[in-house]
Amino acid sequence: MAADFRAVFERVADVMNRRDWDGFSRVFTEDYVEEYPQSGEVIRGLRNAIDVRRNYPGGLAEQGVDVASVRVAGSDTWVMTPRFTLVRAEGSDNIGRVMWRVRYPDGSIWWIVALYQLRGDRVERATMFFAPVFDPPEWRAPYRQESATGR
């Protein structure tokens, strides 16, 4: 049976928004693994993943993710929120991909791409890539157009 990626997103958003640390066990597996290839870090285990979020410098965004604003078009999900914009979420079988545009507490804007794997209806593994917004080089000006997702 195919995974319900919208339901997974709603459960993740719910536990994050409520800071329901105990509820993470209903969304993520106990042996959850989170990888950050750019820094070479691997976070193993649900408790460590929770502690990363609990101890995030400056705290997590108070606005959270507005699940009520979710609209679905085909297999893609789009969400607009004050700090987090879910630009694209899709998947098939038990593999999902998500792209976020995030405004951090210091005001900087970053892109996050997460590739994740489900075990049943819980997230088992995620590989996350982080990239800051940057100005395009002038030499590409003759060849480019503005992105539909904006900066």
Image (cartoon, helix red, strand yellow):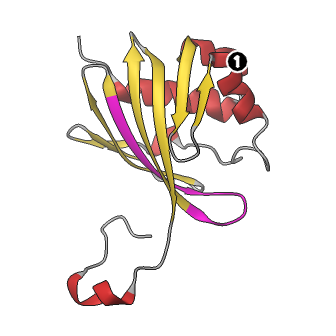
**Chief secondary structure of the magenta span?**
strand
Q: Which residue is mark 1?
A: 47
Element under label 1? helix
Vertical placement of residue 113 versus 45, above or below: below
- Residue 17: x and y in percent read 65, 35
Which residue appears at 54% of the width and 59% of the height? 110
Which range of residues does the magenta coloring cover?
96-109
Residue 133 location in percent, x, y?
50, 68
Amino acid type at image mark 1: Arg
Q: Is residue 7 left or right of residue 39?
A: left
Instruction: Report x, y in % for residue 87.
Output: 39, 52
Residue 20 in view in this figure: no
Q: Residues within 10 Å of mark 1 (few under 14, many from 20)?
A: some
Q: Percent position (x, y) of residue 20? A: 70, 23
- Left or right, residue 32 beside residue 114: right
Q: Residue at x 36, y 64 (%)?
A: 149
